[in-house]
Image (cartoon, rainbow, N blue to C red):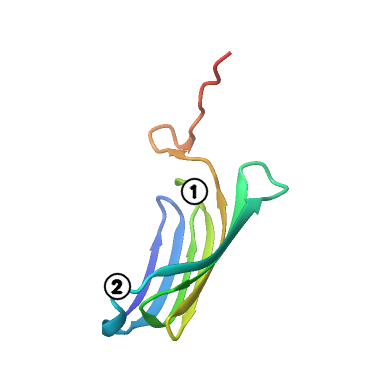
Amino acid sequence: MITMITTTRTNVIYFNLNIRNPRWWDRFDSLWCKSGKTVWKNKFWEVQFMKTPELFRIEFNWTVCQDHAGVRLELGLAGYQLDISFSDSRHWDYKNNRWVIYEQSD
């Protein structure tokens, strides 16, 4: 499957190329995951290694102006996949076209 989508509403760039093994359709197991904060406020990184049904996978996703906007890269080969992401922890307020502002209690 090859998918390419570009939209202006949330400025999304998305590319996906994958080949799945039908015998592994229910195969999923997270083998390792690590995440943390960055020097930038509201930005986080995550790296995950897992078992998946894909024989081959390349996926790239870049988003802005939406919940958890950021960059994500997924690389898979022979049923194993590495996901790398750098994203925002905030949620997008579509009505006001800005990040959600939460009230702080005193």
Q: Is residue 84 visible?
A: no
Furthest residue in direction top, as rendered: 106
Quadrant in which the N terminus is drawn: bottom left
Q: CA distance from mark 2 to mark 1?
A: 27 Å
Secondary structure of the residue carrying tag 1 is: loop
Quadrant in which the C terminus is drawn: top right
Residue 48 spot, x, y in % from top left: 54, 65
| Most foreground residue, 29 or 61 | 29
| 2 or 1: tag closer to the N-terminus | 2
The residue labelled by disc 1 is 68
- Comparing labels 2 and 1, the label whose residue is closer to the camera: 2
Residue 65 spot, x, y in % from top left: 48, 46
Secondary structure of the residue carrying tag 2 is: loop
Residue 105 spot, x, y in % from top left: 54, 16
The amino acid type, in three-letter code, at marker 2 is: Asp
The amino acid type, in three-letter code, at marker 1 is: His
| Most foreground residue, 98 or 28 | 28
Residue drawn 42% across the image and 69% down it = 29
- Left or right: residue 1 versus residue 16 is left
- Rendered position, 79 above or below 87: below
| Most foreground residue, 88 or 98 | 88
Neighbourhood count class around disc 2 (C-alpha, 10 Å): few under 14, some 14–19, many 20 upward: few
- Residue 47's mark? none
The residue labelled by disc 2 is 26
- Rendered position, 37 above or below 91: below
- Rendered position, 18 above or below 93: below
Neighbourhood count class around disc 1 (C-alpha, 10 Å): few under 14, some 14–19, many 20 upward: some
Residue 15 spot, x, y in % from top left: 43, 71
- Left or right: residue 89 versus residue 67 is right
Q: Is residue 5 visible?
A: yes
